[in-house]
């Protein structure tokens, strides 16, 4: 039985894992910038294949390699993994295109919008009921979206595609629940994406567009390590999710887009006009409202649970 001290240590450990995961996701734009002149398609192909290799090795070490074979016998699981794989492939591709074409700030906006899109999907698709503060947050997010659309002069398709693809991916993961480990889930997704990844690598080789060889050992190593930068944050996140409350995870998730935004502006030199900072500010107001409401609601739930336990005793 865990003591309060050990529980506290586990929470701190989980928070550290989660923070590290989001820190790694936050510096991805800087890493992808190093992969130029590789195309986003080549990055996607290598990211899938090397991630699959790492996951296969981890499953083998855990004695679970047969799970990947059994997945093909479970039609429902296979369809779910195919849908998840398609969505994450879209997300990865659009994100990589954004970073490697100088639109890091727009990509960061997508991940700022993601929590708001997730809440909206909960209402529209799962018929969840929102608290008043959540309605205010969603409304502020909608105003920000309209403002930024006017400011950009067109729909910020990169931001919206990233937000909606990842939110939908999250819904699928929620449907799966805790039936799969992080390694099994990523393995399933990369297995179904593998034929596409192999096709991309072959096509790039045939058309003489590949950069895996010919750009030096350093470039080759960086492409191989795309598997590591994909798998490691996910495993850290899974370790955190088992140890800390969902509210903590919700607050930690803002680390990544903040770092992406700062990296795009301060390191990669992207220009952010004042008018666009106003739009981002509206999104941040919505996220602050959503975060405060989550913290207050979580605290209230814990107090009610303790009161119920006391009454039962």
Image (spheres, rainbow, N blue to C red):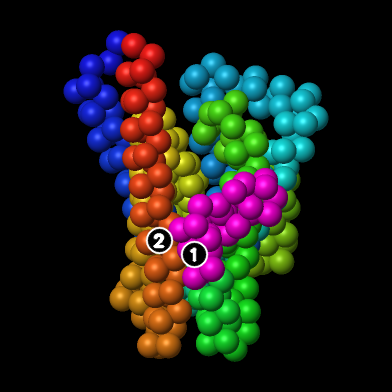
Q: Quadrant of residue 33?
A: bottom left
**With 179 as the anchor, is 75 left or right in this view?**
right
Q: Label 1 crowding class (10 Å Cα cut-off): few <14, some 14-19, many 20+?
A: some
**With 131 as the anchor, is 298 left or right in this view?**
left
**With 92 as the anchor, is 132 left or right in this view?**
left
What residue is disc 1 on? 136
Q: Residue at x 39, y 23 (%)?
A: 308
Q: Earlier in the sequence, mark 2 or mark 1?
A: 1
Q: Label 2 crowding class (10 Å Cα cut-off): few <14, some 14-19, many 20+?
A: some
Q: Which disc is residue 61 wearing? A: none
State whether residue 55 appears in this view.
Answer: yes
Q: Residue at x 63, y 33 (%)?
A: 176
Q: Residue at x 54, y 16 (%)?
A: 63
Where is residue 186 shown, x and y percent of the image?
57, 38
Where is residue 252 shown, x and y percent of the image?
36, 50
Image quarter where the C terminus lies is top left
Residues shaded magenta? 113-141
Foreground residue, 32 or 71? 71
Where is residue 180 shown, x and y percent of the image?
58, 28
Give me the C-alpha separation between circle 2 and circle 1. 8 Å
As helix, strand or loop, the secondary structure at mark 2 comes to helix
Where is residue 227 shown, x and y percent of the image?
50, 46
Foreground residue, 289 or 261? 289
Residue 6 sits inside the magenta stretch: no
Considering every residue shown, the one lying at the far left of the view is 5
Most common secondary structure along the magenta stretch = helix
CB of mark 2 within 8 Å of CB of mark 1? yes
State whether residue 193 appears in this view.
Answer: no
What residue is disc 2 on? 289
């Amino acid at each position: 039985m865990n003591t309060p001290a050990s529980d506290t240590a586990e929470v701190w450990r989980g928070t550290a894992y989660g923070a590290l995961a989001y820190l790694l996701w936050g510096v991805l734009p800087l890493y992808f910038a190093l992969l130029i002149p590789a195309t986003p398609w080549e990055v996607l192909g290598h990211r899938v294949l090397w991630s699959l290799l790492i996951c296969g090795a981890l499953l083998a070490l855990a004695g679970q390699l047969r799970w990947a074979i059994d997945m093909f016998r479970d039609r429902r699981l296979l369809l779910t993994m195919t849908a998840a794989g398609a969505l994450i492939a879209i997300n990865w591709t659009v994100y990589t295109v954004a970073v490697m074409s100088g639109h890091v700030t727009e990509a960061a906006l997508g991940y700022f919008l993601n929590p708001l899109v997730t809440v909206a999907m909960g209402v529209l698709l799962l018929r969840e009921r929102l608290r008043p503060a959540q309605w205010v947050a969603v409304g502020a997010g909608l105003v920000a979206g309209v403002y930024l659309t006017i400011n950009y002069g067109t729909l910020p398709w990169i931001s919206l595609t990233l937000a909606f693809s990842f939110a939908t991916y999250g819904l699928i993961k929620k449907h799966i629940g805790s039936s799969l480990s992080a390694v099994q889930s990523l393995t399933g997704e990369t297995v179904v994406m593998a034929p596409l990844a192999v096709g991309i690598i072959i096509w790039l080789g045939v058309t003489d567009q590949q950069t895996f060889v010919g750009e030096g050992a350093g470039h080759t190593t960086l492409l191989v390590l795309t598997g590591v930068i994909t798998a490691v944050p996910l495993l850290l996140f899974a370790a955190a999710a088992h140890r800390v409350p969902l509210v903590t995870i919700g607050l930690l998730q803002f680390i990544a887009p903040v770092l992406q935004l700062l990296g795009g502006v301060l390191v990669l030199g992207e220009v952010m006009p004042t008018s666009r900072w106003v739009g981002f500010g509206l999104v941040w107001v919505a996220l602050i409202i959503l975060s405060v409401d989550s913290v207050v609601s979580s605290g209230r739930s814990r107090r009610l649970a303790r009161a119920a336990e006391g009454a039962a005793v």
